[in-house]
Image (cartoon, helix red, strand yellow):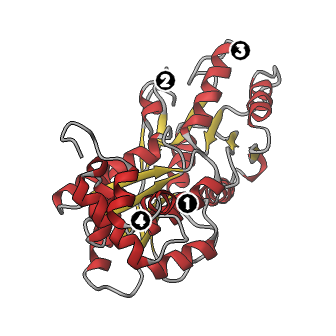
Amino acid sequence: MPPTRRPTIIDVAAAAGVSKSLVSLALRAEPGVSEATRARILHAAEDLGYRSNVWARNLVRGGENLIGVLITDLGNSYHTDVVLGLEEAAQEQGLSVMVAHGMRSTERLVAQLRRQLALGVAAVVVVSSWLPPDLLEASARAAPLVVVGRLPVAVPGLDTINNDDAAGTRLAVEHLASLGHERIAHLGISNRPAAQQRRAAYATTMRARGLAEHIVVVGPDDVTEGVATLLRATARADGTGPTAVFASNDLGASRVLDAAIDRGLAVPADLAVVGYDNSTLARTVRPRLTSVDQPRADMGRLALTLVVERLEGRVEPRHEVVAPRLVVRGST
């Protein structure tokens, strides 16, 4: 092969003594290739320097230094903050991180998880609650698996890290009550397990404060209409509408802020707003958003710690719950 020409998949096929299509399957970690043939192909790819094939080298060596990370949505600052904390901890341990995201598609998440396992990663950290529990259980038998987030049901064999959603909700509602608010409404954004926990804790806290008659929950089926309903009630002349809103995440809270300003309401004089996550959004909207902070980077670092413990031989699962805190800003 001329020294100026980069090796191709045809060169790899010739060196390994197989067809081009078989090389393609092996390099993509697809089924249909025996382990012996896959190893021969990967060794050939590495020897030829095919695309400086990091995957080939890693797979030949068993993936012992590579941690797979799977997130629901790359555009979600909660997910990226967890990954940043995890990457920082991985670098300290001499480990590499491979991030894949599901683009808010369960089917894509499933495919990405299977691909990471097929690539031979040492462990997988899943920052998502969207994957089917039976798939998570089966995957945890193939490689150590840590889930960051609240799952709908307990899954045997894996480690979990989640925020104390009930405690965070109490902080939000009690903060608003301490400011004199009684008519505190809740805006739900989804039916995911964490959102359900926050919705239930909102009602429990309102009852504990003697505010059961003021419980109002809107969303998540139609968040836009839910926000409109809240703002119409707030603007009623009889003064019976909510004076404060606790949203199940910062995105929902920001939608309340936007709608309130569009209707000429002053925040927090006419309506106080609290979000959840303390995301980048909370620090950029105006007024700045009071929000419940999940220690996202710490959760990522803890996930890496659990991975390392598993790789060092720990067998019993660990389930960690981290404490949130309230960050008070201009919206209250």
**Quarter assignment of residue 280:** top left
**Which of pointers 4 and 1 indicates the residue nearer the eye?**
4
- The percent coordinates of residue 253 (x first, y second) are 59, 34
Mark 2–mark 1 contact, CB under 8 Å? Answer: no
Q: Amino acid at mark 4?
A: Leu
In depth, the one of 9 and 73 nearer the eye is 9
Query: Which badge, 4 or 1, comes first in the chain's sequence?
Result: 4
Question: Residue 119 has which mark?
Answer: 4
**Which of pointers 4 and 3 indicates the residue nearer the eye?**
4
Mark 2–mark 3 contact, CB under 8 Å? Answer: no
In depth, the one of 286 and 239 nearer the eye is 286
Which residue in the structure is indicated by mark 1?
166
State how far apart marks 2 and 1 are (Cα): 25 Å
In depth, the one of 229 and 66 nearer the eye is 66
Is 116 drawn above or below residue 158 in the view shown? above
Which residue in the structure is indicated by mark 2?
285
